[in-house]
Amino acid sequence: MKKIVILSLIISNYFIANSQNVGIGTLTPAGKLHIKGGADTSQLVIDANVVQSNTHPLIRLRNAAGTDILHIHSDDASNVFIGLGAGKFNNAAVGGTSNTFIGSAAGYYNIHGNDNTANGNAALYFNANGSNNTANGNAALHFNNFGDNNTASGYEALYSNASGDNNIAMGDQALFSNTLGVGNTATGSAALFSNTTASLNTANGNQSLYHNTTGVRNTSIGFNALFNNITGNFNTAVGGSALIYTTASDYNTALGYNAGSAYDNGYNNVFLGANVDVNGAGYYNVIAIGQGTICTASSQVTIGNGATNSYRAYANWSNISDGRFKKNVQDNVPGLDFITRLRPVTYNLNAIDLDVFLHKNNNITTQQNKEQSNQSDVANAAYNKALQEKENTTYTGFVAQDVEATAKQLGFKFSGVDAPKDANDVYGLRYAEFVVPLVKAVQEQQVNIERLTRQIEIASSAKMPATVVSEQQIIEELKKENETQKSFNNDLQKQIDQLKTLIKK
């Protein structure tokens, strides 16, 4: 009688109608299926009758219409596949081991690849042979086939990668177009978006190095940094919009917000400071240092801006001046004739107008101007105050155009004048260069002084005014002194010869 009761209890806990639950290991099931394991047994064991695959999953979930919506299966103890179509073609027998694919169609075509992790719809979808990849996000590493050691995190990150290795993409569509490039690092939405075959680039910031396709070994940090670079190599841009318009040049370095951002730059430029720039396209070999500093020609170094009023250091500037590397050396520097024609003046610099002139051609977008205006009101006020203080300072010097005209009158190619290279450039003077004609002038003065002194000596010995002593008289007197010196030298040589003879004896 007891056995019948027990059987009745067991049968009553099986599913009979929609309102009833099934309990295994419990007489009070809390759901349609309630499994309660014992202290020494597993909670759930499911044995497969055939080799598991996506067509014969261990667990199949369906919706109300009877359509499959989730499969859970594995073909090897090291593999885990969760999702409709996840790991569908994986073959552990030929190398597809230690893979974890979670998401609809994640790792769909994987066959030989191993040690991969895909988490997201269609992540690592076409991967057949690539290994050691990590894809986290919808369609991340979607087209990867042979690429190894890649890490993609974000919607469509490294989407097009086929066989590129050792890439890191963090952000939606980061390294989206990469196919063969290796060793790239992209962090930020659409960073290195257009990169296809280029390698060893680092982009950190939304849309950083966005248009790069084949340029290699570039480093960009900041929103839109090196945004338009396509084929340029070995560039470094740190700061929002730094080098944003440079497309195909090499060896540029920009550090600061908007640094080098106004034009498509040439090669070998250095921009250091916020808003430092040039005022024309294609400049090369420039160095601009300071906030808002503008270079106006190639191969130019500019330090400071229109408001700068002092340059300080603990040693003098040294110019390279090695005779081994000088040619066509000539003694043709004018002295007194040049120096006496110069016009020393005092003046006030129109610093505000000069600043406007230098920045008039900056190709900054309206949005960038708006951002800069909104974020820099205090800085702009301080800068404008410094410009005004500069205008109130009285300076001593020359006018470059005057110096240039004086040199031309004498046929003197004076390197002290830094003439404009084009209509956007300004005149400059290299005041250190004035030392050379000044030295020449002193030398010429010394010759004149010695001549006058000689005239006075001759006039004094002849008891006549120095003013009537002619050049010819001075020359004759010098000839006499020269003959006397020669005679003295001859006598001295004879004495030396006699001493040598005595020594030999």
Image (cartoon, grey):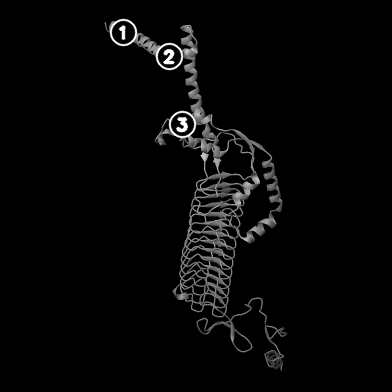
Residue type (three-letter) at the residue carrying disc 1: Lys
Who comes first in sequence, dot 1 or dot 3?
Answer: 3
Q: Determine crowd level at label 1: few under 14, some 14-19, many 20+ residues with C-alpha closer than 10 A.
A: few
- The residue nearer to you, when weighing 233 against 20, is 233
Please name the residue shown 51% across and 57% down the image. Answer: 218
- The residue nearer to you, when weighing 307 against 136, is 307
Query: How far separated are the C-alphas under marks 2 and 1?
Result: 31 Å
Please name the residue shown 49% across and 12% down the image. Answer: 466
State yes or no: discs 2 and 3 in contact (Cβ < 8 Å).
no
Residue type (three-letter) at the residue carrying disc 2: Ile
Q: Nearer the viewer, mark 1 or mark 3?
A: 3
x and y, in percent, of residue 265 in the image: 52, 54
The residue indicated by pointer 1 is: 494
Q: Determine crowd level at label 2: few under 14, some 14-19, many 20+ residues with C-alpha closer than 10 A.
A: some
Who comes first in sequence, dot 2 or dot 3?
Answer: 3
Query: How far separated are the C-alphas under marks 1 and 3?
Result: 44 Å
x and y, in percent, of residue 249 in the image: 48, 55
- Mark 2 lies on a secondary structure that is helix
The residue indicated by pointer 2 is: 474
- Mark 3 lies on a secondary structure that is loop
- Mark 1 lies on a secondary structure that is helix
Query: Measured along the vertical axis of the image, is residue 78 above or below residue 219?
Result: below
